[in-house]
Amino acid sequence: ASGHFVKFNYTKKKKVEILKKEKLDLTKCKFLLIRQNPPFNLEYISSTYILDAIKDKVKIINNPTSIRNVSEKLYSLNYLKFMPNTIFTQNLEEIKKFIKIHNKVILKPIHGYGGNEIHLLSKLNLKLIKRFIKKHNFIVCQKFLPGISKGDKRVFIINGKIAGAISRIPKKNSFLSNLSKGGKAINIDLTIKEKRISKKIAKDLKKENIFFSGIDFIDQKLNGDINVTSPTGLKTYFDLSKINLAKVFWKGLKA
């Protein structure tokens, strides 16, 4: 693979400096980190198949077979009892019934990321829903949790254990807490309930061969995003707590 040796300097406006370009034999590396943002599309899937061919020669984080099988939204089907009422569907009639029951509903694409293309519906909008289904096929419909105004919680899971957590507060008049959408990060503690759920998911993800992941809570409910392809926030956590989870990450890999 062609790649770049880079140097980081967070004091500069341009934080990454490219030192040199080089072609690498990936099997000679100690570790490969898959840090590609979704969408989880055919190009992404093809990348995981290619990496499957060398996963016995180099440690790949997260395992390419695992991230192909652990869908970031659909994997949460295992944890519906910890979530707000949620359906995964492309059936318009099901969506109409769901909105009638819950009044305020969140629509999300199954393979989206970063708060992109998420809609809050407080009434039936057939034109938008039809367009959304046509574009994304199966989608997520979820009961809206007004507690999002106080923020969500991102929990960092490393090697089957809770490593830390931050809260992200949406900006004024927004229901999106993602930092890329203007959310503000603050330090928080997890509740007993959140710890219990996080420990269970962490244990399950380790069995799935997922080393590094992030899960999110709103008002003590799992929001259904199990981030296994490109979980973010370690630098933000360090800025808030001065705890360097990167060291925990590498120590766990080298153990």
Image (cartoon, rainbow, N blue to C red):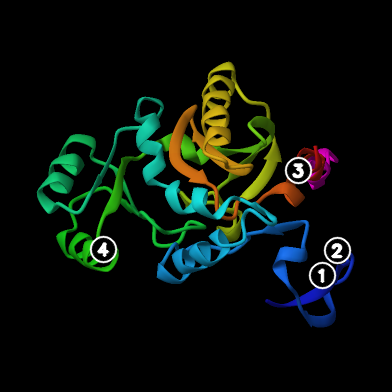
Query: Given contact means CB atoms under 8 Å apart, are the residues at marks 2 and 1 in contact?
Result: yes
Q: Identify residue for label 1.
A: 15
Alpha carbon distance from label 2 to label 1: 5 Å
**Which stretch appears magenta?**
238-247
Q: Give left or right: position of 251 versus 52.
A: right
- The residue labelled by disc 4 is 132
Which residue shows up at 21% across the image and 67% down it? Answer: 134
Q: Position of residue 48 (x, y in %)?
A: 51, 62
Which of disc 1 and disc 2 is earlier in sequence?
2
Amino acid found under the numbered disc labelled 1: Lys
Snapshot quadrant of residue 242: top right
Q: Secondary structure at mark 4?
A: helix
Foreground label between 2 and 3: 3
Does residue 2 sit above or below 7 in this rendering?
Answer: below
The image position of residue 54, as x and y in percent, is: 62, 61
**Answer yes or no: do the residues labelled 3 and 1 have beta carbons within 8 Å?**
no
